[in-house]
Amino acid sequence: MAIERALISVYDKTGIVEFARDIAALGIEIVSTGGTARLLREAKIPVRDVAELTGWPEMLGGRVKTLHPKVHGGILFQRGKAEDRKEAAEHGIGPIDLVVVNLYPFSATAAKPEVTPEELIENIDIGGPAMIRSAAKNFQSVAVVTDPADYAAIALALREKREVGLSARLDLARKAYARTARYDGEIATELERLSANGQVTIGKPGKLPARIDISLERRQAMRYGENPHQAAALYIPAGAPAAGLAGAKQLQGKELSYNNLVDLDAAWGLASEFWRPGVVIIKHNNPAGAAEHESLREAYIRALACDPVSAFGGVLACNRPLDAGTAEEVAKLFVECIVAPGYEGAALEKFASKKNLRLLEMPREAAGEELELKRISGGVLVQEPDRYELRESELKTASERAPSEAELRALLFGWKVCKHVKSNAIVFAREGQTLGVGAGQMSRVDSVKLAVMKAAVANISLAGSVVASDAFFPFPDGVEEAGKAGATAVIQPGGSVRDADVIAAANKLGMAMVFAGVRHFLH
């Protein structure tokens, strides 16, 4: 079906002059509104005002432009239905075959620090979504274009055949409805900021709104999910550039798996906690080792020493660009994936022979503050991410002996790592290095025993180490096991009904104990 008339009304005018010039050259009539019409005229492109088409001027400060039967009737009448054609002719309604519309920048307006209620409300587009929906509904006859990225392909199709094929029109309709759905969701969420008590006022967005609109688009298919019989894909927020790990660039290696991305996210999250050059080795979503040092190479060597057996086949994260010296050490071990903010050329050359090794480079753009979601049967749990950064001034010494400066630095390091270990979590550490990690046990004392066993397997002495616990010790036995293994200081949240017994055990062993006053469960 040949396209004879196009309606163009866009806020984002990227590429619209070139597109309009292309279709005007084909003899397609262009109808337009307001600023778009002015821009096209300035570019010497023939254009007809919507007001001329409808016989009604734009009114109410531009709120009403295209809400008219000669616009929506021209879009919606079914070309293959004789009764529709007859009725359209009786009312002087001509066909509109191509609708090119994008919307007022509601989200960008809402993000302005000093946005007013009036600005927010006036940036709710009415005519645009209405035209998009009408055109998308009648995709069997009408092509709807909502994304400037599609202009080139549409112009090419029109030059070749003077029409947009049915399959392409259906794809455009899907995209259009996804856009209006996302737009309405953004509005519904932001309107929660408004209060009406005699007058309309605006506040900051709530941490946990009454409604959460999530619009996602598939970015990448996975080979499979956690197991080969499960299908999986990576989705990102629709309409936004990929950021964070989802936006990382893969420089080499085979296709990423679902489990790779889960482990990479855990690794990058912990590596990002360190101020000094840091390396984290993750296995099955838990740290097998973590270290920070002035040298990235030394940080890797120390992280690997914690649990070299589990590190085999693990996932690695560096919080600094990976240099040649570090790459030379890493190349001695089989690892599945590495993520870093960059790679020296010599490091890439070192890894080039490992064809299956996946190398990911993190983008400069960090992901925005995101809520954490977890599915349960019949619903979704939502929480703020655990971004709590413990300050030294918040620590409360609970034992008779206060920690030394060296112990304190080690305790704060161990506490950072403990936050990223599955509960129940125990981490033995010295300054800048994990020595033993006990993760995911059903009792805290078992996590202590596991961490001690891991250190023994790695032939690491725990004499003079410190221990971090993600939640309070419910009984003295965990502290007693840690002290017996050689730990001299403990950091824990405190708050148990048996705190006095736990503190007494520490005092008996000559251990320093500090309370953080906050816990870091990770389930």
Image (cartoon, grey):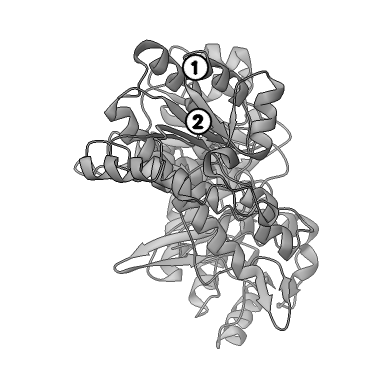
Q: Is residue 344 above or below residue 47?
A: above
Residue at x 68% of width, y 19% of height = 43
Amino acid type, label 1: Phe
Residue at x 60% of width, y 66% of height = 191
Residue at x 60% of width, y 84% of height = 499
* Circles 2, 1 touching at the beta carbon (< 8 Å): yes
Amino acid type, label 2: Ile
Name the residue tied to disc 1.
351
Camera-nearest residue between 487 and 450: 450
Residue 332 is situated, as x and y percent measured from the top left of the image, at 47, 22
Q: Is residue 61 above or below residue 229?
A: below
Horizontal placement of 245 versus 391: left or right? left
Residue 135 is situated, as x and y percent measured from the top left of the image, at 39, 41
Label 1 residue SS: helix
Residue 78 is situated, as x and y percent measured from the top left of the image, at 28, 41
Gap between marks 2 and 1 measured at Cα = 11 Å
Horizontal placement of 212 versus 254: left or right? right
Q: Quarter holding the N terminus?
A: top left
Query: Which residue is the extreme one toward the front?
Result: 90
**Picture disc at residue 338:** 2
Label 2 residue SS: strand
Label 2 Cα crowd, 10 Å radius (few <14 / some 14-19 / many 20+): many
**Picture disc at residue 117:** none
Residue at x 74% of width, y 70% of height = 395
